[in-house]
Image: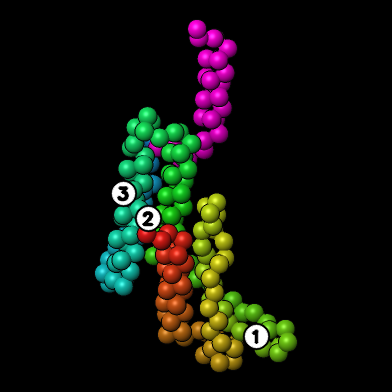
Amino acid sequence: MIHPEIILMSAGAIKALLLMVRTDLIPDENFEEWLNDDGFTYSPEKYGDKKFIFDELEKVKNEFREIRDMKIETQSLMSSYNLLNAHKIRISKLRLIINHEVSYVTNLHARSGIKYVIARTYWIDNNGKKVRRFSKNLGSIDKVYVNDLIPDHLKIDAEKELDRVMWENYRSEYKE
């Protein structure tokens, strides 16, 4: 015999789970738009040396679509939510490797009193938040600055090093 209180309790549990799911992760008609809006377009002139990262980004987006399009019977709602969230963070990390923001700051070494120029960039933590994670020391201010500017070749070298470190970090997080 089926007890009505069990049915009501089950319906209540399902409603509670649905309320816990963040709506920005539930696929809707705008989800494909988010996947396709990287904020940049591949061009060999600008991103030629990052082609392999673009390929990885497309692979992860396709995995995301497969998870999104799975039938609800094949996996639980929470399992789908967790997989979508993990892939959303992964996509954000790849986008950041391709098109990261680098800021240049000075730090004072307390013991020596020497000021250093540091290149810093963000990363995405496992909660999807941007955090300062990577840095590259360019050297002391008096050896770095030329006419009160950081020379382009030093910026390019720093950004390449940050690219390398970010990619290595990504690969260690997502071993396949």
Q: Is residue 104 above or below residue 4?
A: below
Q: Is residue 108 left or right of residue 74?
A: right
Main SS class of the magenta portion in the image: helix
Report, in whole angstroms, how far the alpha carbon at label 3 lies from the one at label 2: 14 Å
Assess whether residue 112 is covered by the magenta stretch: no
The extreme top residue here reads 1
The percent coordinates of residue 128 (x first, y second) are: 52, 52
Q: Is residue 64 visible?
A: yes
Amino acid under label 1?
Lys
Camera-near label (3 vs 1) is: 3
Q: Is residue 96 visible?
A: no
Q: Which residue is mark 1?
A: 115
Amino acid marked by disc 3: Asn
Cα–Cα span, label 2 and label 1: 37 Å
Magenta segment range?
A: 1-27
Q: Which residue is mark 3?
A: 62
Does the magenta-highlighted stretch encompass residue 8?
yes
In front of the other: 14 or 125: 14
Question: Label 1 neighbourhood size at 10 Å, few (<14), some (14-19), many (20+)?
Answer: some
Check the image and report above or below for 108 versus 127: below
The answer to whether the residues at label 3 and label 1 have Cβ atoms under 8 Å apart is no
Amino acid at pointer 2? Asp
User: Which image quadrant is residue 4 in?
Assistant: top right
Please name the residue shown 45% across and 77% down the image. Answer: 161
